[in-house]
Image: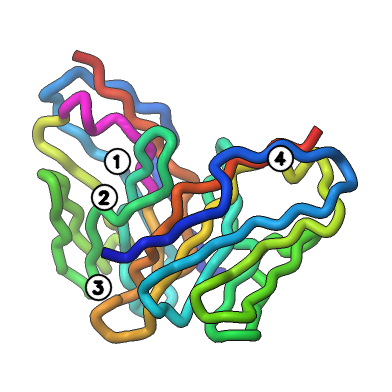
């Protein structure tokens, strides 16, 4: 089974702090994603990566950056956290083989609160 | 752009009731279609999928049929259980999700 893990389930930070959210997958997937989930808005794509050191902006990249130095790890960085970044953050990974047919595998999520 | 529109919730049903959650998608190309489920305190997990027109995805008693003519992928279950209480997301292709429908089943 594919396993996607996230470094924290719950995180509380203060405005202006630099925040790192880590995601690791164990299935050698090429593609990795960061979403945020907010009530009434569903999942919104922040950034994704289709290979090591490659990244693409999603729908709401402002205020975020990412890092993919190794294939299994994809980090989301909040350079200077703000209260409007309080949210649930979900990481996902996806293979590129035909059998995968775009299925994404999600981590359990990190609920971030910025005070 | 690509989009998915799904039935707004919350939806509350009694145990053993019939369930339908509507989902429509924009028709650009021939995307794979998915339903994901999120149980309380967890991430999303794949419930079922369909990769081409007229395909039916099914799992755990849930079904959805890829309808190209109506650009729809409605989720159905004949008899829901309390354990089906969760948030359900329809998704188009790899990156576009609906807003989610919260389902609560009461005994």
Which of label 3 and label 1 is nearer to you? 3
Look at 57% across and 47% down and name the residue there. Answer: A8
The correct choice, above or below, for A35 with respect to A24 in the image is above
Q: Which residue is mark 4?
A: A86
In whole angstroms, how far apart are the C-alphas of marks 2 and 4? 32 Å
Q: Which mark is residue B51?
A: 3
Mark 3 and mark 1: Cα distance apart in space: 19 Å
Residue B12 position (above or below residue A82): above
**The quarter of the displayed image where residue B106 is located:** top left
Q: Separation of disc 1 and disc 4 at Cα?
A: 29 Å
Q: CA distance from mark 2 to mark 1?
A: 6 Å
Q: Secondary structure at mark 1?
A: strand
Mark 2 touches mark 4? (CB < 8 Å): no
Residue indicated by mark 1:
B21
**CB atoms of marks 1 and 4 within 8 Å:** no
Q: Answer with mark 3 or mark 1, whichever residue precedes in sequence.
A: 1
Mark 4, other Cα within 10 Å: few <14 / some 14–19 / many ≥20? some
What x and y, as percent, mark residue A47?
64, 68
Q: Which numbered dot is residue B74?
A: 2
Element type where label 2 sits in the image: loop
| CB contact under 8 Å: marks 2 and 1 | yes
Residues at badges 2 and 3 in contact (C-beta under 8 Å)?
A: no
How far across and down, in percent of the image, does residue B75 sit? 24, 47
């Amino acid at each position: 089974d594919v396993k996607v893990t996230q470094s924290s389930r719950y995180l509380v930070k203060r405005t202006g702090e630099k925040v790192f959210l880590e995601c690791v997958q164990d299935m050698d997937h090429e593609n990795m994603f960061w979403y945020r989930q907010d009530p009434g808005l569903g999942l919104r794509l922040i950034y994704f990566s289709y290979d090591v050191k490659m990244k693409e902006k999603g729908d709401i990249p402002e205020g975020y950056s990412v890092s993919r130095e190794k294939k299994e790890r994809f980090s989301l960085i909040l350079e200077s956290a703000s209260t409007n970044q309080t949210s649930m953050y979900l990481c996902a990974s996806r293979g590129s083989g035909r059998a995968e047919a775009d299925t994404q595998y999600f981590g359990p999520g990190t609920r971030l609160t910025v005070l | 752009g690509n989009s998915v529109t799904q039935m707004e919730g919350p939806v509350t049903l009694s145990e053993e009731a019939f369930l339908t959650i509507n989902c429509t998608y924009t028709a650009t190309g021939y995307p794979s279609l998915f339903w994901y489920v999120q149980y309380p305190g967890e991430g999303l997990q794949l419930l079922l999928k369909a990769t081409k027109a007229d395909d039916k995805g099914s799992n755990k008693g849930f079904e959805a049929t890829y309808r190209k003519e109506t650009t729809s992928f409605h989720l159905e279950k004949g008899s829901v259980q309390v354990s089906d209480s969760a948030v359900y997301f329809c998704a188009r292709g790899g990156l576009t999700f609906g807003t989610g429908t919260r389902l609560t089943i009461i005994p």
